[in-house]
Amino acid sequence: MAYCINPAVKATIAPPIAEAFSWIPQSPRERAFLNLSQAVPGYPPAAALKAHIASLAARRATSFYTDILGIPPLRLALARRMAGVGGDIGLEDTAITAGGNQAFCMTMNAIARPGDNVIIPMPVFFNHQMWLEMMGMEARLLATDPALPLPDPEAAARLIDERTRAIVLVSPNNPTGAVYPPPLIAALYALCEAEGIALVMDETYRDFTGRSEAPHELFARRDWRDTFIQLFSFSKSYSMTGYRVGSVIADARLIAEIEKLVDCVAICAPHIGQDAALFALEELDGWLAEKIDLMAGRFKAIDAALHHPGLAYERVTSGAFFSWVRHPFPGRSAREVARTLAQRHDLLVLPGSIFGPGQEHMLRLAFANVEAGDMPEVAERLIESQRDEDATL
Ligand SMILES: Cc1ncc(COP(=O)(O)O)c(C=O)c1O
């Protein structure tokens, strides 16, 4: 190859899930391999959604581009859903993207330039950090208490300088599962408002907080558009990761800038995915409520399993699709521990080290893919790794 590669892209880590998948043993196993690496619900989309998608595929219109910012009925339905009770969101404040990751990337490009920085609490969702680095922007990592990894607004304030464009939150959090309390979100909003920077909240897991109350009340503020940007994904709530639908809600003036970016990178989100997302918002409240319950059952089951008295792995936080667990091998890197769990104990988890510096002792268990009845087996395999007489672990 005689040409150059962008050094910022080259210096960025390889896609971590793909690397973890490469650790899965290829030889036949005597027992089921448990894959807790990727935050994907293990169940299929609703039967009604699958039938609807099949009918969409037969329509000529489905094969055309849509408006760059998405089909208006979906944008309206999304605005209505996110406004909840008392919120005010217009169609012009919404953009549909090809997934939540694209929503993040387009938003960052619309608000920040190379050399600008964005504050993100630790541990950080790896794709956020990867994108910022590749764009020549700084992911300014905010240290948090390892025992309770929530951002401290005063510590966040100390990181802000003239090149800071936003604070980015993920709640419920990936990788920790922590659900940010509404007063904390309000305090960080107040900080961003006072500093004239954006509060960007990735609410990919907002349906899985485990609480009946709204995750926050920010859309009920008359002036939310001055500060708040919400990102959402249809991937997890409706088990439709492959249909690639996400969204941004922000001031219409930012949405108009995002339109330019989406036009260049995707022209529009997949038409069939957008129609599916609209159907989901209009028809699947009952199905979603059932899945929220099912996921709460998985959450309870893994939490109970991780409290096994023989387990030296320590669950630090848990919520939504994730348990954030400290491994008991201080001398070993998280990557080494995760690789060994996959290769010897038929259990795939992600090493904490991909979620930022200082996370060598942590593992992320994405349990959404595993049925409640199998959670004790997850704990068994962790215990097995402790017992492994071969000193590699
Ligand atoms: C916090 C967060 N944001 C965004 C995404 C990506 O979602 P999408 O499939 O909609 O691109 C994920 C997926 O794991 C995620 O955890």
Image (spheres, grey):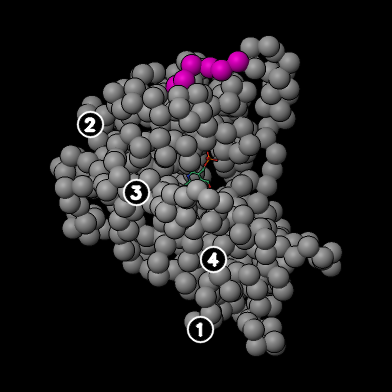
Mark 1: amino acid: Gly
> Between disc 2 and disc 1, whose residue precedes?
2
Q: For the stretch drawn in magenta, what is the main secondary structure?
A: loop
> In the image, residue 116 lies at what x, y percent?
26, 47
Residue at 73%, 15% (x, y): give it: 58
Q: Secondary structure at mark 4?
A: strand
Residue placed under numbered mark 1 in the picture: 331
Count residues near mark 3 (Cα–Cα under 10 Å), then give few for <14, some for 14-19, many for 20+: some
Horizontal side of residue 90 vs 264, given as left or right: left
Q: Secondary structure at mark 2?
A: helix
Residue placed under numbered mark 3 in the picture: 136
Residue placed under numbered mark 4 in the picture: 351
Residue placed under numbered mark 2 in the picture: 226
Residue at 25%, 35% (x, y): give it: 227
Mark 2: amino acid: Asp
Count residues near mark 1 (Cα–Cα under 10 Å), then give few for <14, some for 14-19, many for 20+: few
**What are the residue bounds of the magenta stretch?**
64-69
Question: Within the image, what quadrant is residue 219 found in?
Answer: top left
> In the image, residue 197 lies at what x, y percent?
22, 41
Mark 4: amino acid: Pro
140 vs 350, nearest the viewer = 140
- For label 2, being within 8 Å of ligand 1 is answered no
Q: Are marks 2 and 1 in contact (CB under 8 Å)?
A: no
Mark 3: amino acid: Gly
> Between disc 2 and disc 3, whose residue precedes?
3
Residue at 63%, 12% (x, y): give it: 61
* Vertical side of 236 occupied by 175: above or below: below
> In the image, residue 112 lies at what x, y percent?
29, 40
